[in-house]
Amino acid sequence: MLFMEFSRYCEQLEGISGRLEMIDTVSRVLPSLTDEELPIFVRFIMGRVFPDWSPLKLGIGPNLLYDAVAYVAGARKGAVREAINTLGDVGLAVEGLLATKEQQSFFIEELDLVEVYRDFERMAVAGGHRSQRGKLLVARKLFGNARPLEGRYLARLMLEELRIGMGEGNVRDAIAKAFGVDVALVEHAHQAAGDLGEVALVARKGPDALQEVEIEVFRPVKMMLAQQGTIAERIEEYGDVAVEYKYDGSRFQFHRKGDECRIYSRRLEDVTVGLPDIARHLMAATDRDIILDGEAIAVKDGRPMPFQYVIRRFRRKHQVDAMMEEIMLVPRVFDILYLDGETLIDRPLSERRRILEEVLADHVAPQVRTHDAAAAEEIYARALDQGHEGVMVKVLESRYLPGIRGRQWVKVKPGVDTLDLAVIGAEWGEGRRTGVFGSFLLACRDEAGRLLPVGKVATGLSDEMLAEVHALLKDLVIAGSGKEVTFEPQVVFEVGYAEIQTSPNYSSGYALRFPRFVRLRVDKGVDEVETLDGIRDRYARQKNGAGSSP
Ligand code: ATP
């Protein structure tokens, strides 16, 4: 498939608003693709280049992209920024810039879908200190051969945000329709394989092949997530439930095969190097080929230390020993996904738990089964007393649902509600904050993945935290005028607030009253920030008197 054809499909999809029509359009394309093209097309159409679990990351920042486009279009980098500012979209800006140069260039090579993917692979593996230069050369070549419409989607793909509204659900349904297989089977394979590109290939072979897809060691599985809720409602609905402490650490997934092990973060990054103590503890606790899910916590004098201590270790690549003297981490394992060749995610929690207790000699997080709300409340009080965040209440019959934030796991914690929001802009600080960003523009996301502002936060950041945040954000500036800058959205803040108000000032329609920085969520991506629906929901609950307190 030519990249031009792919671009035309994208343009077509961008013009469709109905879900069923989108699914239908994609399903008609899939059968015509070769085995090589199919997984690439499927990922690209979702704005992804590699599977989520792949160690390959494109790592193209906006600056590099602007450099490449400026070079090819014969424009200043400032002109690229201006075009983006004016049009509000990188893709459209690149398209416009390439259109102006197009009349002059006759020697372009036709871009091919698979070849574009190979170039992305080259960029992702380009290592060492010359890697930025290597990436830039490949990016220049790609834009040099791109026609304007291709430029639109090439630029968006490089930033892995296609903006055409094809999420995982739609693509899964399109695969099922294209190859005449049950959606549930496609979903099963997706949960085990963690990549719809590969699943599309299997779906082409038929339902039996889909059924046989298993989890593989050293290919991290997306983590199951939790909703907020209360103990009473869970017990009322399900009777017997499992209650565990909610540890305030950082999520990890441990994989072992033979004598080798690897540990992955919540964002599926390989963090083994930073966590030798976790690896040692778990290697000693079992000799089976295994995948475990748990929380790493830091403990000092028997009490848990704050989350920031733990997260620093997850980001550490060097001098881990010195840090280990300061902070020792211990694992609290609460789930098992795989054992000796067998995928366990389709089994109920009660059974997974039994297996976990059988095969792991140590570090299993305690769990209590009860249908007595008072007993569960007692555990909750004890959890808080011991310095944990609260409790998790889990449905015993529930399967493990990778990447799903469902009602099967409910988190119960006290106090002020917080929101995870994307940092999309900032204002330069004044006075003591001169030279660093001082206030930050925050955004939630809507159904189409667009980021919509909901407020600014300037309080709650220590000088040390301001410096840390500044270091993260300074390379993400994509535009700036006067005191204000706009960021490539990559950083997530957790913020508290007194109240959510409706507001004509922000395109989300809402604003936070008294927003306050709580912590930096380096363990979360911007695709995980609060949704507009979630904010609407909180606003409604608040009006009914069940909102957060200042
Ligand atoms: P929060 O912001 O409340 O920490 P989150 O958005 O990081 O939540 P959630 O899925 O909402 O993630 O809450 C579940 C998280 O709680 C898990 O990702 C995990 O890191 C942590 N956790 C701590 N203890 C447990 C436990 N016993 N079972 C499951 N998750 C646990």
Image: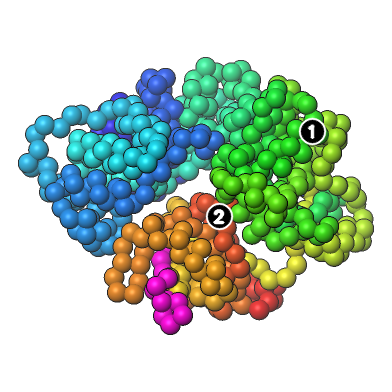
Up-down: is 402 above or below 525? above
Q: Is mark 2 within 8 Å of ligand 1?
A: no
Percent x, y of residue 487: 39, 61
Nearest the viewer among 513 and 21 is 513
Q: Is residue 110 above or below residue 506?
A: above
Circle 2 sits in a helix, a strand or a loop, which is it? loop
Residue at image location 86% in from the left, 31% down from the top: 358
Classify residue 191 as left or right of residue 103: right
Magenta residues span 424-436
The reply to whether residue 26 is visible in this rendering is no
State which quarter of the image contains the N terminus: top left
Q: How far apart are the two marked residues, 1 and 2, measured between alpha carbons?
A: 29 Å
Judged left or right of residue 488, residue 386 is: right
Say which amino acid is labelled 1. Answer: Ala
Q: Position of residue 531 (x, y in %)?
A: 54, 58
**The disc labelled 2 sits on which kind of residue?**
Val
Q: Is residue 432 found inside the magenta-colored segment of the image? A: yes
In the displayed image of the protein, which residue is found farthest to the left? 104
Which residue lies under the disc numbered 1? 284
Q: Which residue lies at the image location 85% right of the left edge and 35% below the top edge?
A: 361
Q: Quadrant of residue 44?
A: top left
Q: Residue at x 65, y 52 (%)?
A: 323
Q: Where is mark 2, residue-wise?
A: 522
**Quadrant location of the C terminus in the rendered image:** bottom right
* Badge 1 density bin: few <14, some 14–19, many ≥20, Cα 10 Å: few
Which percent across, then down, holds residue 461? Answer: 55, 72
The stretch drawn in magenta includes residue 249: no
